Amino acid sequence: MTPAFIGIGSNLGDRLASCREAVRRLGSTPGIRIKKISSLYETDPVDYLEQDRFYNAVVAVETSLSPDALLKECQEIERQLGKTILIPKGPRTIDLDLLFYHDQILNAPGLQIPHPAISNRAFVLVPLTEIAPDFIHPALHTSVAETLRRLNVETSRRDVSTKIERIAAPGWEKIPLVSNGPS
């Protein structure tokens, strides 16, 4: 089994339910075993700012799937949960990103590992650092905790703030959803 990390994000509809269902489906996919799940964070959008805030988390998995097969499974879960992209970097019901696949570096059409934007994405680095602070980024040769520290230094120099708020501790994917009465 190969270790890998998958980023989860949602900012349309019931964000919590979408993230929980994505985790559930990942865990029930043959060839994927969930090892750790970060806290759930509410984060400001990046790049395309005219949209609602996101819920973000990172899941550590072990997999017998190849990188391509793991990506295809993530894309199938996105499709099943209704992901559509009308605006690049825009709103989405669910987003699953293959962040790392062990220590592999892969640049293929449709798949880059490590995910190319990790080093300047606090919404990925904060939850990733929570569950795997010592994981070494295979291209940067630094731990994800050090990558986050460097990003915080750079962002403070540019006076750019991205609000990242922890809204649920590890185990959030098991918390019962609030019901609005009988259905």
Image: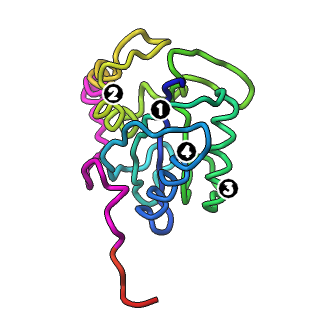
Q: Which residue is mark 4?
A: 96
Task: Identify the amino acid type marked 1.
Answer: Phe
Q: Which residue occupies 31% across, 35% down? A: 126
Disc assigned to residue 5: 1
Q: Are marks 2 and 1 in contact (CB under 8 Å)?
A: yes
Please determine whether, in this image, residue 180 is positioned above or below residue 60.
below
Q: Which residue is mark 2?
A: 132
Q: Are marks 4 and 2 in contact (CB under 8 Å)?
A: no
User: Is 15 one of the magenta-colored residues?
Assistant: no
Disc 3 element: helix
Residue 4 x, y percent position in the rendering: 50, 28
Q: Which residue is mark 3?
A: 79
Residue 174 x, y percent position in the rendering: 35, 58
Q: Which residue occupies 30% across, 46% down? A: 39
Of the pair 82 and 181, the residue shown nearer to us: 181
Task: Identify the amino acid type marked 3.
Answer: Arg
User: Is 157 one of the magenta-colored residues?
Assistant: yes
Disc 1 element: strand
Q: What residue range appears in magenta?
A: 151-177
Disc 4 element: strand
> How dense is the environment of label 1, judged by Cα within 10 Å: few (below 14), some, or many (20 and up)?
many
Q: Earlier in the sequence, mark 2 or mark 1?
A: 1
Disc assigned to residue 155: none
Of the pair 33 and 48, the residue shown nearer to us: 33
Of the pair 61 and 111, the residue shown nearer to us: 61
Report the mark closest to the observer, 4 or 2. Answer: 2
Q: Earlier in the sequence, mark 1 or mark 4?
A: 1
Residue 132 x, y percent position in the rendering: 33, 27
Q: Earlier in the sequence, mark 3 or mark 2?
A: 3
Give the CA separation, mark 1 to mark 4.
Answer: 10 Å
